Amino acid sequence: MMSDEIFTKQKSVLKKDRTRMNTTLFLTEFKLYLRSFYGPFFALVFPLLMLVLFGSIYGNEPTPFYGGRGSMDVMMPGNIALILCVSAFMGLPLTLGENKDNRVYKRFDATPAGKERVILIQILVQVAVTVIGVFLQLGVGWMLYRVQISHLWLLFIGVCAAMYSLFSMGYLIAAASPNLKITNAICYTLYFGMMFISGCSLPREILPDSINRIAKLFPLTHTVDLLNGITQNQSLSQYWLSWAVLLGGGTICFLISLYLSKKNAW
């Protein structure tokens, strides 16, 4: 009887220690993230600057051209997709790649924290920053321009599906790249390429058909399409391809990245 009580107490202490360790790691990684300039600026500040810039130019008066919606109502899904793209291709893989090059994870393997726990915490930091950025975008958009977003819960589900796909792709880049230089080259190429052809910065209607066919190969394009469909109250069955690409492609990238991260010494 006494041994059962001792075992229960030890288990409770270990659980508290793990929770304290996870909290400490998360807060430490979050502070390290905020100390850098590029990550917080492009994930939190730059999308708001874009919102204010285009809002001051176009306003958000309802117009028949957008079916009774305002310009900022139409642009909001693209702004949200831009935040997801920044975290997935400029935040997560570059952080993982830099730590991998500096043998940070190899040293953590010799501690109770372990490599996998630290990587998971860093992913959660990027998720938290992305969620903060999305809520800031929606909040400032509503306060300044009365941006109307119906079915917020459905928009949140779409954002989660997009995060799963884009973050899995970013994780795959970090796991597959042999060094930070190659990670940088791939991430910058994908980030700027997708930003200009996916519809989150320029309307795809003004792009040539050949570019639009290429854009359909990238998950950010399907993210913009899906979020646009949700905000316009369209039937989600019309976007079954976007759901399939985001969830199916994200799962494939995630499984491959897990395999590579275990196979290759970090």
Image: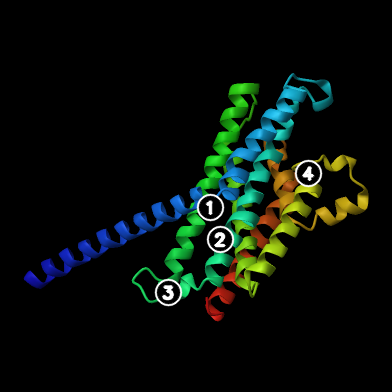
The image position of residue 15, as x and y in percent, is 27, 62
Q: Is residue 260 above or below residue 83?
A: below
Q: Residue at x 21, y 61 (%)?
A: 12
65 relative to 137 in the view: left or right: right
Q: Is residue 78 above or below residue 244?
A: above
Mark 3 or mark 4, which is nearer the start of the sequence?
A: 3
Mark 4 or mark 1, which is nearer the start of the sequence?
A: 1
Residue 199: numbered disc: 4
In the rendered view of the protein, which quadrant contains the N terminus? bottom left
Circle 3 packing at 10 Å, graded few (<14), some (14-19), many (20+), is few
The image position of residue 129, as x and y in percent, is 52, 46
Q: Which residue is mark 1?
A: 126
The image position of residue 124, as x and y in percent, is 48, 55
Residue 95: numbered disc: 2
Mark 2 or mark 4, which is nearer the start of the sequence?
A: 2
Q: Is residue 78 above or below residue 18?
A: above
The image position of residue 58, as x and y in percent, is 77, 24
CA gap, disc 1 to disc 2?
Answer: 10 Å
Q: Which of the two marks, 4 or 3, is nearer to us in this view?
A: 3
| Residue 84 seen anywhere in this rendered image of the structure | yes
CA gap, disc 4 to disc 3?
Answer: 42 Å
Tally of numbered discs:
4
Q: Residue at x 72, y 64 (%)?
A: 185
Q: Are marks 1 and 2 in contact (CB under 8 Å)?
A: yes
Residue 4: numbered disc: none
| Residue 252 seen anywhere in this rendered image of the structure | no
Which residue type does callout 4 highlight?
Gly
* Disc 4 element: loop
Which residue type does callout 2 highlight?
Thr
Q: Nearer the viewer, residue 224 or 245?
A: 224
